[in-house]
Image: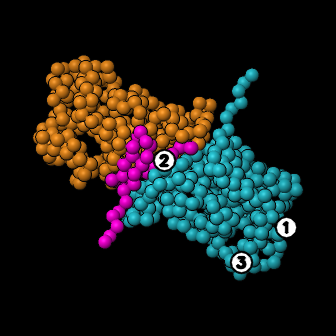
Chain colours: A orange, B cyan
Amino acid sequence: MTILMPIGGNENWKKPIVSREFVRRAGGDQADIVIFPQPSILKTTGADYVQFFLDCGARSARSLDFRTREESGADEFVDAVKSASGIFISGGTQMRLPATIGGTPLESAILEAYQRGVIIGGTSAGAAVMPKVMIAYGKGGPTPREGIAQFSPGLGLTNKIVFDQHFRQRDRLGRLLYLIAAHPGLLGVGIDENTAAIVEDENLITVIGTGAVTIVDGSEIEATNVAEIENGGAVAVSSVRVHVLTSGCSYEVVSRRAKISMPELEA
Amino acid sequence: MTILMPIGGNENWKKPIVSREFVRRAGGDQADIVIFPQPSILKTTGADYVQFFLDCGARSARSLDFRTREESGADEFVDAVKSASGIFISGGTQMRLPATIGGTPLESAILEAYQRGVIIGGTSAGAAVMPKVMIAYGKGGPTPREGIAQFSPGLGLTNKIVFDQHFRQRDRLGRLLYLIAAHPGLLGVGIDENTAAIVEDENLITVIGTGAVTIVDGSEIEATNVAEIENGGAVAVSSVRVHVLTSGCSYEVVSRRAKISMPELEA
């Protein structure tokens, strides 16, 4: 089974519900976590996550601290990925990771680990970078507008789904609608802060955390003028199906069905 | 035919595409407009709209300047509504109008005029106040949350539709989703600034203006936990159908179908 665990950013480190779930799925006290801090501009990001994942119960955690394409080729990094039980990508600027490791053996090692069933987690930029179609940057606002988001190639861990992050906090529905109008075959998944969308086998999406995951399904779109609009004009699009899912809710990509978590009836 | 013309606020008075359409549908150079400035706290609102609608080509325009329930009972106001070809409600605070005229002969005169085919226009608060279920106030954000909006009874010109305004500008999708989750039988219509949703016979909605109208259709909702969530928690809701419509696009309430305006092919 493949597992992606994109997180919407700003995980709560004091009550780490989301991060503990990542460590649990990576093997719990058998977990060997490898961290990619490249999206972050902060020197301490890698070391901070090493300590944090150890605090969350992992057996080992290591940050792969390289900054250039050349440095990334070191055997020790490829070997670290090969022996990891969980891989985690930090927040920051999502373009930094594919611009550094795109097309390298290290990127291939991540893809192979993912195919073997190693969980790939990432927060904020680290969530955005997972799919082939990555939202690189863009503006807020609930209405889709021409040019509201720019796309760039990501790691390619999924070709079907696109992740957006800080979703509610930065008001990003418009850019996800714009993307889905531009290619209704993609599924948009907008993830709030301190919330994760756990994706098993590119199909079953389960929500954990304190916010919501917004599913934007364009498979029934009847018409859109997205290709005709210029200069930031508002884009029209009909029949987008939207699900807002909170902790415990799930969604099946293949059947395009959501399951809402309801309280148990009292006796 | 009945006509409502809710406007999302902030009409452009220099290029009054939206307001000219209101005057045109009220009879153009035969239009006799009556203005309700009650939502506004500004003394000049009524007089400003009188001049503006005259500038837009109306034959006559009159502001009904009362502030109390008692004053509103004057025959001259009821007679003015009876002879109007168009009625317009200003922006401001939507609760002020129903709190002043709710249950009075003046309110009945508005309803009767509407049933006779007199166009009822309104901007911002003047749009929100039209339906029976009125969004009284609330917060922004794209995710529905418990208590994100408070409801109050409006004029009752439609029982099927709820209007929200300044939609994109104030990021109000979450409160409309919350409302539709709370009663999936209602249709949510979120109107951007300088944009109108012209509603004929409570069925055909046509968009005019520079922004978008967002249709939130809950008729296919499969599940929601809206009744179970407390303390501002995020509300889950599945299978909401959303349409983002720009100028020239339309929507049929009965069939729940959107029609996107596409460019003509060139010869």
> Quadrant of residue A58 in the image?
top left
Q: Nearer the viewer, residue B247 or A259?
A: A259
Q: Nearer the viewer, residue B18 or B241?
A: B241
For the residue labelled by badge 1, is the local secondary structure a helix, a strand or a loop? helix
Q: Is residue B128 above or below residue B68?
A: above
Judging by the rendered image, the residue that carries numbered circle 1 is B83
Q: Chain of mark 2?
A: A
Residue A84, label in figure: none
Q: Is residue A49 left or right of residue B62?
A: left
For the residue labelled by badge 2, is the local secondary structure a helix, a strand or a loop? strand
Q: Is residue A261 magenta?
A: yes
Q: Chain of mark 1?
A: B
Cα gap from disc 1 to disc 2, whole angstroms: 45 Å
Observer-side mark, 3 or 2, equals 2
At x 48%, y 47%, the residue is: A242
Judging by the rendered image, the residue that carries numbered circle 3 is B104
Q: Chain of mark 3?
A: B
For the residues beneath circles 3 and 1, the answer to whether they share a chain is: yes
Percent of width and height locating residue B96 = 63, 70
The crowding category of the residue bearing disc 2, from other C-alpha atoms within 10 Å (few below 14, some 14 to 19, many at least 20), is many
- The type of residue carrying mark 2 is Val
At x 62%, y 50%, the residue is: B256
> Quadrant of residue B125 in the image?
bottom right
Please state the extent of the stretch shown in magenta in the rendering. A239-267
The crowding category of the residue bearing disc 1, from other C-alpha atoms within 10 Å (few below 14, some 14 to 19, many at least 20), is few
Percent of width and height locating residue B27 = 84, 55
At x 68%, y 77%, the residue is: B103
Judging by the rendered image, the residue that carries numbered circle 2 is A242
Residue contact at pointers 1 and 2, CB within 8 angstroms: no
Q: Is residue B74 magenta?
A: no
- The type of residue carrying mark 1 is Ser
Whether residue B194 is visible, yes or no, is no
